[in-house]
Amino acid sequence: MTGAAGVVAGAVGAATVAGDAVARPLRAPALPGPAAGRDVVRRELRGMWVATVANTDWPSRAGLSAAAQRTELAAHLDRAVERKLNAVILQVRPTADALWPSAYEPWAEYLTGTQGKDPGWDPLGTAVQEAHDRGLELHAWFNPYRVANHTDPSRLTASHPARRNPGWVLPYGGRLYYNPGLPEVRAFVQDAMLDAVRRYDIDAVHWDDYFYPYPVAGQSFADGPAYEKYGAGFPDRAAWRRDNTDRLVREMSERLKTLKPGVRFGISPFGVWRNADTDPAGSPTRAGVQTYDDLYADTRGWIRKGWLDYVVPQLYWHIGNPAADYAALVPWWSETVRGTGVDLFIGEALYKCGDPAQPAAWQDPAELSRHIDLAAGHDQVRGHAYFSANSVAADRIGAMGRVVADHYRTRARPPR
């Protein structure tokens, strides 16, 4: 996610029984509490990201006991209910690894401190059950291509697919990535993610803003050999890269609908597709990054082609930001989804509220509530998601509490 600490930037005591890994019939989770069915007045997403990469939100540190990890997870879910949220977006494949007993990839190091080490329980299976028991949706958040937050393949566990297939991996910007230009890579990462879809009663597959990596000054992404092999027929490497990302999104959408039609597919991209001075169809912004040109992610195209069920643009700017104004981007995205059947939720930068390094607007506890007010004036906006769980918990200046008091007085069901 853009704006979160480093590795998320640019920017979820007894072991569970084996039954946690068995898929359950798809169903709409019930709302918690005795008032369920009586105080529901609307359908809107009220989501909370739970980032696991580098132990950003959960677990609070690697190596905690299974019981301690479960207790922390339950606390995040309870807090979501307390804040009248209705969906948790849990990061379950942060770095080409897994928070479930995957048939394809090793256990994530953020659980035990050692990649590939069994944590003694099933975090994803438990999260699905515990979320549904509380009336929360569980959106499983996967990162398709990020392999490691370092560039040394020897630090990966010996059985890691990236070590068994060194030709799949490229270093860039201090990290390792799978090469999106290789068809075998695209097939593998889809297989790895769909393993979780088969096993669990998740409500959605969720991707964030990472496809091709964010540009790093003075560095190039060394995919020349793949371009030479597969790039014939494209006007340039940028068009070929966009097609690679398109293929990943389209193929995942098609496979997901075949495997489990009731599981939604959503993406949370960086908030600017293109600036209007680059493309007349773009937003009235002057952002330094444009997903179409810099990340090779045609987010607008995916919406128009119907490949997504929902989109959560990360509008991590304040109202009045001179380069990317929240008040200008919400209407642009609202018009982009109009008539497509794709639900629009807005990604909110709760983590910026009260951060002394941020502009004055973010020191005002009412800024985020004003975002919700503004978005309510655009009929295509069907909810919001907040980055991220620790910021929901800390609520440094009361911005989240203000949102709840002003806008979430009653519970709501997620759109379906």
Image (spheres, rainbow, N blue to C red):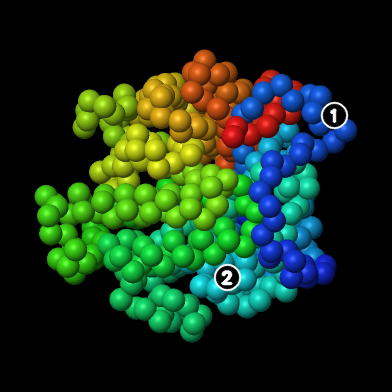
**What kind of residue is marked 2?**
Ser
Quadrant in the rendering for residue 68: bottom right
On screen, residue 386 versus residue 307, left or right, reads right
Q: Pinpoint residue 408: horizontal percent, then vertical percent.
A: 70, 25
Q: Residue furthest right?
A: 34
Asked if residue 224 can be seen in this view, the reply is no
Front residue of this view, candidates 110 and 144: 144
Q: Are marks 1 and 2 in contact (CB under 8 Å)?
A: no
Find residue 78 and report its horizontal and vertical position in percent: 77, 45
Numbered circle sitting on residue 287: none
Query: Residue 35 — which label?
Result: 1
Residue type highlighted by circle 1: Ala
Q: Is residue 139 visible?
A: yes
Q: Which quadrant would residue 185 be assigned to in this image?
A: bottom left
Crowding at dot 1, Cα within 10 Å, few <14 / some 14-19 / many 20+, comes out as few
In the rendering, at what x and y percent does residue 210 appear? Answer: 41, 52
Picture residue at 74% right of the left edge, 25% below the top = 40
Q: What residue is at 62 percent from the left and 39 percent from the top? A: 47
Q: What residue is at 55 percent from the left and 27 percent from the top?
A: 382
Circle 2 residues within 10 Å: few <14, some 14–19, many ≥20: some
Of 44 and 10, nearer the camera is 44
Instruction: From the image, tell me which residue sits under label 2.
Output: 102
Q: Is residue 370 above or below residue 316?
A: above
Q: Quadrant of residue 124?
A: bottom right
